[in-house]
Amino acid sequence: MLDTIEMLEAIGSDASLRYASTVELTNLLDQGQATTALTAAVMSGDASHLAREFGDMTNFVPQATQSFVSSDLN
Amino acid sequence: MLLSQNFAYYHKMNTPLVAPPKDTRQGSLAVVGMGMTLGSHLTPLSRSHIEQADVIFAGLSDNIVEQWLQRMNADVRSLQPYYKEGKSRRKTYEEWVDLMMTEVRAGKRVCGVFYGHPGIFAWSPHKVIEVARAEGFQAHMEPGISAEDCLYADLGIDPGTVGCQHFEAGQILFYERRIDPSGYLVLWQVGLVGDRSLARFTTSGAYRQVLVDVLSKDYPLDHEIILYRAVTLPIQKPRIRRIALRDLPFVDVPTEETVILPPAATLKPNHEIRERLAALDKLEKEASVA
């Protein structure tokens, strides 16, 4: 049985799964005994349901400071 | 020639390819892109760097993607804890470089893993490669599928049709840039536009109003703009919102969202240059006949 991250990896790397309908994917997840959090996320289209399983952590994303050129910062 | 001989040798011997032994005393650095979407974008070569490294430093946009990464290598160190509200992000990025270089200098095979493409809107990956090479270490970057790449696919935009300018939104405010409204304009990190301290996680609508005022010199206020977020998990759909430019200060804009301004003007023919080129064509044709 795959866990949630393995299922996400499988969905992300399979063209049929990646673009399956919500109903199709939910049925497949049901057969694969997916967690309720993953099933709820797929059914609602809201990934925040996965916080139940992985914690409610929001990553900060900016990795650049192009606002200022370096000569202005030094 | 040598490479093909090697392949012929391995084929003949029916032996799997085995990488040559590494000099374990010499540190090295690979900076790779994770792509945007879990399971969909990581290239085989980047994955191989991750699996073969002694230590991984992760600058990723999604906590679950980071947990996926942890399954590929036993020593994954998140760069997230170095962000802090009130602390300049420039300081954070310098710390990231120091963290990676400390392990390279200790003789480790280090892999920096960054979301999307590690060299796009990312200061530390370029800097750490520069520092490592200056100190004589082997260092290079592997590209990844970026948010920009996803944007073109999800929004059906070809940057080659009428051109496309990209800026971090703040640069439009802090510097006098020349915007071309006959092409696409893509603004990154609008969610913290106008932050001069580099220490805030977000800025208010009042700052976005300044951006709108600047953009209104080149675009009508009712011009339709697009707010876009690429998917990080394969069960998501891209977030695409279309609003009028004037409404930008009044909607929530998370830092991971990008603002796209489609063209507001048609391309203007350059008759002078066209005539010059026609004259050149004529001259070349005459020369070829003679």
Image: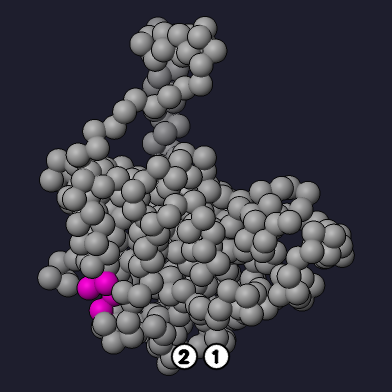
Whether labels 2 and 1 share one chain: yes
> Mark 1, chain letter?
B
B245 vs B171, nearest the viewer = B171
Q: Amino acid at mark 1?
A: Phe
Q: Is residue B258 visible in this depiction of the protein? A: no
Name the residue located 34 percent from the left edge and 53 percent from the top edge: B55
Magenta span has B89?
Answer: yes
Residue bounds of the magenta highlight: B88-92
Residue bearing the label numbered 1: B250
* Cα gap from disc 2 to disc 1, whole angstroms: 6 Å
Label 1 SS = helix
* Residue B51 lies within the magenta run: no
- The image quadrant where one finds the N terminus of chain B is top left
Tag 2 near tag 1, CB within 8 Å = yes
Mark 2 secondary-structure assignment? helix
Left or right of B10, for residue B89: left
Instruction: Give the residue displayed 43% in from the left and 47% down from the top.
Output: B50
User: Which chain is disc 2 placed on?
Assistant: B
Q: Position of residue B179 (x, y in %)?
A: 40, 66
Q: With B289 as the anchor, is B102 left or right in this view?
A: left
**Viewer-closest of B70 and B83:** B70
Which residue corresponds to the image point at 76% horizontal and 53% vertical from the top-left?
A17
Closest to the observer, B272 or B145: B145
Quadrant of the image containing the C terminus of chain B: top left
Q: Amino acid at mark 2?
A: Gly
Residue A3 position by quadrant? bottom right
Q: Which residue is mark 2?
A: B205
